[in-house]
Image (cartoon, helix red, strand yellow):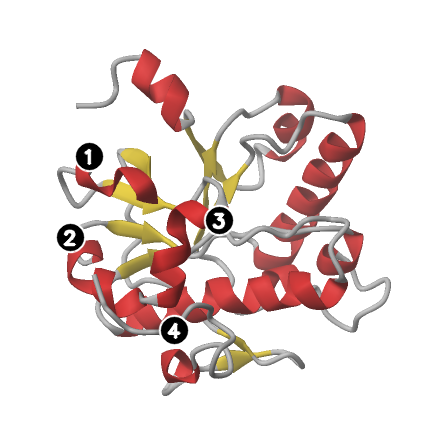
Amino acid sequence: MSNKKRKATIDDGMNPELVSGAEFDGYFGIPTIKKPEEIIIPDRIIPFSKLSKAKKFEDAIACYEMDKEFSDLLIHPDDYIEELKKHIFISPDCSLYRNAPLSVQIANVYRSRAIGSYFQRMGVYVVPQVRWGNSLTYTTDLLPEKVAFLGIEKHSIIAIGTYGCSQTKDDKYHLKAGLESALETLEPVVVLVYGSMSPKIFDDYRHTTQFVHYPDWTTLSHQGGVR
């Protein structure tokens, strides 16, 4: 890995070199992850920390784990380009805690799109990860645009993670409300879902798109899906 001294992505302005040549979306200038020429549906979704377990292109690499597990990817993205070119890559799932300041939630949307956009321009097949926080990120109640969905083109493939996001009544409410808003805004052709797919949340929307379900890593391991 790189011996660079950088310790955080904000050290020099959120890695401005990552967005050189990028297209930007909305008032907040969120880097855009372009719709792929061909939609490819992964066979498996593997956490970034288990990158060595990926054996073929159709093994998608995703960051559905604690942020510290993929922090080096955010700080030293160039170290992973060649390896990620061998697989499908789902852009980083940077945490959008609902009780975090809105500025922090917006910054993490930016960070995820910046990395995804950069990797895409470097030749990696990138699927945009869609993560929303509180209602201010997926509605226009306060902001003039739904910031959680900026930087993603319509009628494409997206990914969402539900693992650990439906434990409380409030979690379930925001998961369903955000999902409905994402589907209305982005009109995706395919939605990859990592984690549980509760019928109470997803059944109302099955006619709107193709959902493809993937078990979380622990479940996949117990099912013998890890080789």
The local secondary structure at tag 2 comes to: loop
Disc with the residue nearer the chain's start (1 vs 2): 1
Q: Kindly report the distance in space between the C-alpha atoms of the residues bearing marks 1 and 2.
A: 12 Å
Check disc 1 and report the residue beneath it: 53
In this view, the residue farthest toward the right is: 141
Disc with the residue nearer the chain's start (4 vs 2): 4
Q: Kindly report the distance in space between the C-alpha atoms of the residues bearing marks 4 and 2.
A: 27 Å
Badge 2 crowding class, 10 Å Cα cut-off, few under 14, some 14 to 19, many 20 or more, is some
Q: Is 160 displayed left or right of 212 in the figure?
A: right
Q: Nearer the viewer, residue 169 or 145?
A: 169
Q: Is residue 43 visible?
A: yes
Query: Can you tell which mark lies on residue 6?
Result: 4
Identity of the amino acid at label 4?
Answer: Arg
Q: Residue at x 34, y 59 (%)?
A: 73
Check disc 2 and report the residue beneath it: 86
Identity of the amino acid at label 2?
Answer: Lys
Query: Can you tell which mark lies on residue 87?
Result: none
Q: Residue 6 placed where, x, y %?
A: 38, 73
Q: Is 131 displayed left or right of 159 in the figure?
A: right
Q: Kindly report the distance in space between the C-alpha atoms of the residues bearing marks 1 and 4.
A: 28 Å
Identity of the amino acid at label 3?
Answer: Asp
Q: Nearer the viewer, residue 170 or 199?
A: 170
Disc with the residue nearer the chain's start (1 vs 4): 4
The local secondary structure at tag 1 comes to: helix
Query: Can you tell which mark lies on residue 67?
Result: 3
Q: Is 221 displayed left or right of 9 in the figure?
A: left
